[in-house]
Image (tube, rainbow, N blue to C red):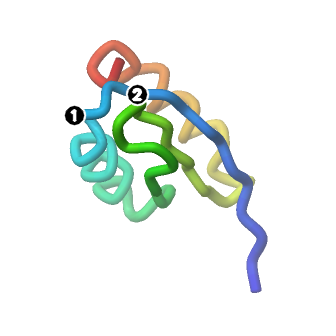
Amino acid sequence: MKCLDELILRIAPDKFHYLKFILEGYDNMATLSSLDSREGFVIVRYPEKLAKDLFDLLTSIAVKVS
């Protein structure tokens, strides 16, 4: 079983599906789950080897999901 790193983020609650679509579109770079849908807290699980790519992607879309 592979271990995944986890990242907790707070996004605009109405941007959950957008972020999920983007992450899955990058060949399942990461999985996204909701922790608190009303407050916009999500958890991103990803393989360590994709951390840089994931952080680059999240940085580039931060304005769109906040």
Residue 66 lies left or right of residue 21; in this view the side is: right
The one nearer the camera, 58 or 14, is 14
Q: CA distance from mark 1 to mark 2?
A: 8 Å
Mark 2 neighbour class, 10 Å CA radius: few under 14, some 14 to 19, many 20 or more: some
Q: Residue furthest front?
A: 38
Q: Residue furthest bottom?
A: 1
The one nearer the camera, 9 or 48, is 9
Residue 39 on image: x %, y %: 41, 31
Q: Give the quadrant of the C terminus.
A: top left
Residue 31 on image: x %, y %: 48, 60
- Residue at left offset 38%, top offset 50%: 23
Q: Could you tell me how many numbered marks the image carries?
A: 2
On screen, residue 56 above or below 36: above
Q: Residue furthest top?
A: 63
- Mark 1 — residue? 14
Three-letter amino acid code at disc 1? Asp
Three-letter amino acid code at disc 2? Ile
Residue 13 on image: x %, y %: 30, 33
Per the rendering, the mark at residue 41 is none
- Mark 2 — residue? 11
- Residue at left offset 58%, top offset 32%: 55
- Residue at left offset 29%, top offset 56%: 25
On screen, residue 51 above or below 63: below
Q: Mark 1: which secondary structure?
A: helix
Instruction: Give residue 27's quadrant in the image.
Output: bottom left
Q: Mark 2: which secondary structure?
A: loop
Mark 1 neighbour class, 10 Å CA radius: few under 14, some 14 to 19, many 20 or more: some
Residue 45 on image: x %, y %: 60, 56
Residue 29 lies left or right of residue 14; in this view the side is: right
Q: Give the quadrant of the N terminus.
A: bottom right
On screen, residue 53 above or below 65: below
The one nearer the camera, 65 or 28, is 65
